[in-house]
Amino acid sequence: MVDTPSLGTNNRPMPMSSAPQGVLAAILLVLPASAAPPPASAQEEIVVVGGEGRHCGEDPQCFNRLHPAIPMTARAQPGQTIVFRVRNASDFDLDPESTYDDPRAGDGQIGTVHPLAGPVHIEGAEPGDVLAVTLLDVAPGRFGYTSVSPIGFVSDHVRGSFRANWRLDRTEAVSDDLPGVRIPNASFPGIVTVLPGPAELAAMLAREAELRAVGGAGFPPYPAHASPASVCGPDGSHPAECLRTLPPREHGGNLDIRYLQVGVTLYLPCYVEGCGLAIGDPHFAQGDGEVSGTAIEMDADFTVTTRLIEDGPALRRGPHFEGPVRVLDIPSRRFYATTGFPLKAAGEVPPDMRYLGASERIGALTNLSKDVSLAARNALLEMIDYISETYGLTREQAYVVASVAVDLRIGQLVDAPNVGVTALLPLDIFTGR
């Protein structure tokens, strides 16, 4: 995910991916969408997508909105290796030494979010197909950040501003802002997506507009800093119809699932010819929940391969994925856990419930029925207090640690009225104990 950035624009080279041995026989930098299909020898070539310019608006293979009119910027055969050179979620320079003064800074609607590398036309893909995307490698950039964002899960309780700047390598992340904490590398793409088709676009725009109209959360189309400007910008062909990238949807998008690591295959529905595969929002590490609103946000290169499935899973409600069980582990030999139930103070109305218009009824209760979100909030708040009191961190620092390392997991959903959620903290991230 992302918060409002405070640094200058992305003006450093992206790291080249360390692709698996045997696939570096040749590099095919780009094939324009209008070019002829690659020859049979393309299976031995690598398609490299994105990474030019200071920011997404200067990169012809980068976009940050979703619409079926967005043109493909590269082509690849199923089975061909593709390297996506991806910018961080905010599309700003993460190098603390940067002196670039980005004119896009200060946009309260975060119109620069999220820069995606692509879209890539997968040869032979038709609407109705399923696209299988397997992650082969992730090469992290040198720097990352995690901050307390207004969209965080309990940012009504933890209101202070705090940003941790991280130094990254292939092994771990460390930060002078969180001394004594080392976060193991568990990199993955927060966003893997295809382009929506016209029918899907219309349905998504309509339902999200209806939700916002009654006070629900959401991000309407916003043309400022939109890429490509020719389609989604203020003077583009469809400025009021381009979806923001912040929520996930049936096409994939901002899934923020930490298990989508190397070795995992994600299944996405194709809605347009060629699917329009794109990747964005690189994360070095994230806890289940991304609770402060950000993970360890970074630049990265993602190496993937694809295959087409003509009679794959129906994917009626969202993407599917599969992979090795090692990605389900927590990166620690020991853990500490807190629990939460749907309990609250009299008069309190959880922020995400206010749009429902039942504030008087909800406020009078101190126990809600089978409310997983409230149970998760309580487990998280208990964990933030534990981290702060045990390790001498501020609540804002503890909130950031929880966002990058703590997993929120459902215990049970049937023991009415109190469903249960646990928050799991891997203890090995603390170097002083």
Image: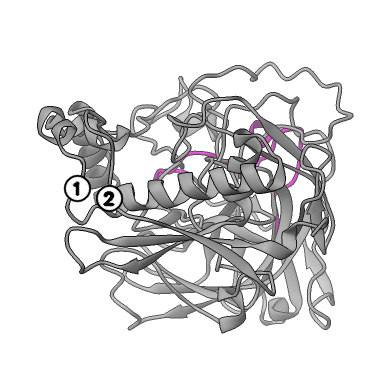
Residue under numbered circle 2: 342
**Residue 421 as seen in the image, left or right of residue 33:** left
Residue range highlighted in magenta: 48-70
Contact (CB < 8 A) between labels 2 and 1? yes
Q: Earlier in the sequence, mark 2 or mark 1?
A: 2
Residue 382 horizontal side relative to residue 249, left or right: right
**As shown in the figure, which amino acid type bears the numbered disc 1?**
Leu
Asked if residue 416 is among those painted magenta in the image, a careful observer would answer no
301 on left or right of 328 = right
In this view of the protein, which residue sits in the foreground, 217 or 406? 406
65 drawn magenta: yes
Indicate the position of residue 415 as horizontal and vertical percent values. 21, 67
Tell me, yes or no, if residue 34 can be seen here.
no
Q: Position of residue 81 (x, y in %)?
A: 68, 72
The image shows residue 163, relative to residue 425, as above or below, that is above
> In the image, what residue occupies the spot 10% across and 33% down?
361
Residue that label 1 marks: 368
Q: Residue at x 47, y 32 (%)?
A: 155
Q: Is residue 160 above or below residue 272?
A: above
